[in-house]
């Protein structure tokens, strides 16, 4: 699985919809697919999945507004040698 696949898998689990895979620019908060509690759950899950120190305070909601934004943010946070390419 690629880094993006792992992020999207967690997003599907938390949002309950496959739409996050189909539309990388889906506005998660505007569409009520992700709320504050879901965002915290996602932060914890991705921190564990990628073995990175990540807290909700470190996440900019603007950067995490879409699946594409979340993938990009996570890829910036993990060491290049640990990014899993598709």
Image (tube, grey):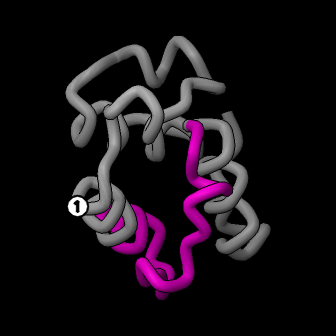
Which of the two residues, 30 or 7, is positioned nearer the viewer here? 30
Query: What residue is rendered at 23% in x and 37% in y?
Result: 13
Residue 8 drawn at (x, y percent)? 45, 36
Could you tell whether 39 is left or right of 51 in the image? left
Residue 8 magenta-drawn?
Answer: no
Q: Is residue 36 above or below residue 16?
A: below
Q: Residue furthest front?
A: 30
Quarter of the image for the C terminus: give it.
top right
**Circle 1 residue:** 37
Q: Is residue 71 above or below residue 77?
A: above
Could you tell whether 58 is left or right of 18 in the image? right
What is the secondary structure assignment of the residue under circle 1? Answer: helix
Could you tell whether 61 is left or right of 19 in the image? right
Residue range (magenta): 45-66
Query: What residue is rendered at 67% in x and 46% in y?
Result: 69
Query: What residue is rendered at 34% in x and 16% in y?
Result: 18
Residue 72 drawn at (x, y percent)? 72, 51
Query: What residue is rendered at 35% in x and 58% in y?
Result: 39
């Amino acid at each position: 699985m690629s880094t993006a696949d792992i992020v999207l898998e967690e997003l599907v689990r938390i949002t309950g919809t496959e739409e996050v895979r189909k539309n990388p620019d889906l506005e998660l908060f505007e569409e009520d697919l992700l709320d504050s509690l879901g965002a915290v759950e996602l932060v914890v899950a991705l921190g564990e999945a990628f073995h990175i120190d990540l807290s909700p305070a470190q996440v900019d909601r603007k950067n995490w507004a879409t699946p594409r934004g979340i993938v990009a943010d996570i890829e910036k946070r993990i060491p290049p040698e640990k990014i899993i390419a598709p």
